Image (tube, rainbow, N blue to C red):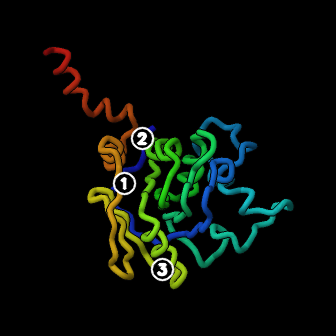
Amino acid sequence: MSIPKFEKLVSPAIPLRIENVDTDQIIPARFLKAVKREGFGDNLFRDWRYDKQNHKIEDFPLNNPKYCGKILVAGKNFGSGSSREHAAWAIYDYGIPVVVSSFFADIFKNNALNNGLLPVQVSEDFLKKIFNEIEKNPQTHFEVDLQNQTFTICSTGEKTTFEIDNYKKECLLNGYDDVDYLVSIHPEIEAFKQA
């Protein structure tokens, strides 16, 4: 599965000021029947976005019209729980290519990177600054620069760096999945075989 190239994103952010969000909260198990990656965004945070009568819960951040954007800012320990890849699919399918937190569960982080979703890990202090800026102005913009591995609060100019595996970075920058990457280095593979 090829993914769109990711280089730089400037966008407002949606705040989810909740810690220990697990994969069952991101996409409940009852929605895991499909095997295609499309359609999961409709049920992202389903039990938090809708009540038992299937009405939108208006003050949940994804339903609240004052919040918008392509960046989800979440509390510490995002993506814990089961190893379901569908959690990354749901966030990406909803239209969010970046999740920011001060800590990600390892399996979620790997699933995200394998599916075009960029997890940006920042310090606890910087995460608080991001939340505070969104609280002051929900339309404040943030810049995610993958090439330079920086996250910037545009309103203040404050910037931090984030870590990413070099291989995964190259894949995101070029829109490669693992197979695309192997195709891209086919000449080198052939040269190695001939050596």
> Which badge, 3 or 1, is on the more N-terminal residue?
1
- How far apart marks 3 and 1 lie (CA) works out to 24 Å
Badge 2 marks a residue whose secondary structure is loop
Q: Residue at x 52, y 65 (%)?
A: 73
- How far apart marks 3 and 2 lie (CA) works out to 34 Å
Relative image position of residue 57 (x, y in whole percent): 75, 69
Dot 3 amino acid type: Glu
Outermost top residue: 194
| For discs 2 and 1, the disc positioned in front in the rendered view | 1
Outermost bottom residue: 136
Q: Label 3 belongs to which residue?
A: 133
Q: Label 2 belongs to which residue?
A: 2
Q: Residue 62, located in which quarter of the rendered image?
A: bottom right
Q: Residue 189, located in which quarter of the rendered image?
A: top left
| For discs 3 and 1, the disc positioned in front in the rendered view | 3
Vertical position of residue 189 compared to residue 101: above or below: above
Dot 2 amino acid type: Ser
Vertical position of residue 104 compared to residue 133: above or below: above
Q: Residue at x 52, y 41 (%)?
A: 107
